[in-house]
Image (cartoon, rainbow, N blue to C red):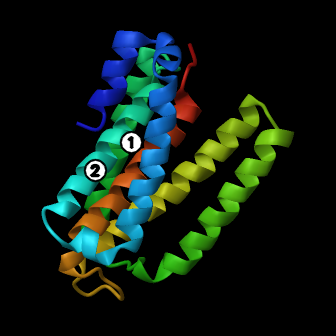
Amino acid sequence: MQFWWPLQIFFSFGDRGFLMFLRLIILAAVMSIVLIVVLACCESVRRTAPMNFIMLFLFTLVEGFLLGVVSSTYSKESVILAVSLTALITFLLTVFSFQTKFDVTGWGTGLFIILFIFTIVGFIAGFFMPGRTWQLVYGGIGAAIFCLYIIYDTQLMMGGKHKYALSPEEYVFASLNLYLDIVNLFLLLLSIFGDRN
């Protein structure tokens, strides 16, 4: 369902999506932030059914809409390529996570620090270093970071002999983490391979 939204909005509205949905875009962005904070910070909400499923569904719906808006600025071929690459990479990384004896669950702090620095550098460089070369370098490094995050979050979900694991009660939190990794990988691949309309 997640990748249906971007394709549907792209094929239906194209560039007009930004004008038609400006208020909806702002509302969706605010809702996305509120929902992620609630899901991340309120243990009782994310552990209590059916509220946890409702919140996760709403978050997925809002994020799907926002992805659709972003995707509408790229060509059809770019979006399809990014979706295909994201699906293939996610599948291969999941298989790797299940098959490898290499444990990355202890890398949480390091991955967070790398992602934090990556975000700050990207924000600052966005103002001072615009250009396609910087976008490709930033997208490539970001894609590599989120590939590591996919392995990390998959192994956290698996538990077993890994150093760290999420409780089975945290299934919504685990799926949210993995979902965000995949969405970010998609966006970064889209920025690398995307051909803007």
Could you say which is closer to the camera, residue 188 or residue 166? 166
Q: Is residue 128 left or right of residue 187?
A: right
On the rendered structure, is 49 left or right of 173? left
On the question of residue 100 being in view, the answer is no
Which quarter of the figure has residue 159?
Answer: bottom left
Question: As displayed, is residue 110 above or below residue 138?
Answer: below
Task: Work out which quarter of the rendered image holds the C terminus and state it.
Answer: top right
Q: Quadrant of residue 130?
A: top right
Looking at the image, residue 11 lies above or below residue 181 = above
Q: Position of residue 32 (x, y in %)?
A: 43, 48
Viewer-proximal residue, 154 or 38? 38
Q: Answer few, some or many: residues within 10 Å of disc 2's Cα (few below 14, many 20 plus, some between 14 and 19).
A: few
Q: Quadrant of residue 2?
A: top left
Residue at image location 60% in from the left, 46% down from the top:
140
Residue at 39 percent of width and 37 percent of height: 85
Dividing the image into 4 quarters, which one contains the N terminus? top left
Q: x%, y% of residue 11?
A: 35, 13
Tag on residue 63?
1
Identify residue for label 2: 91
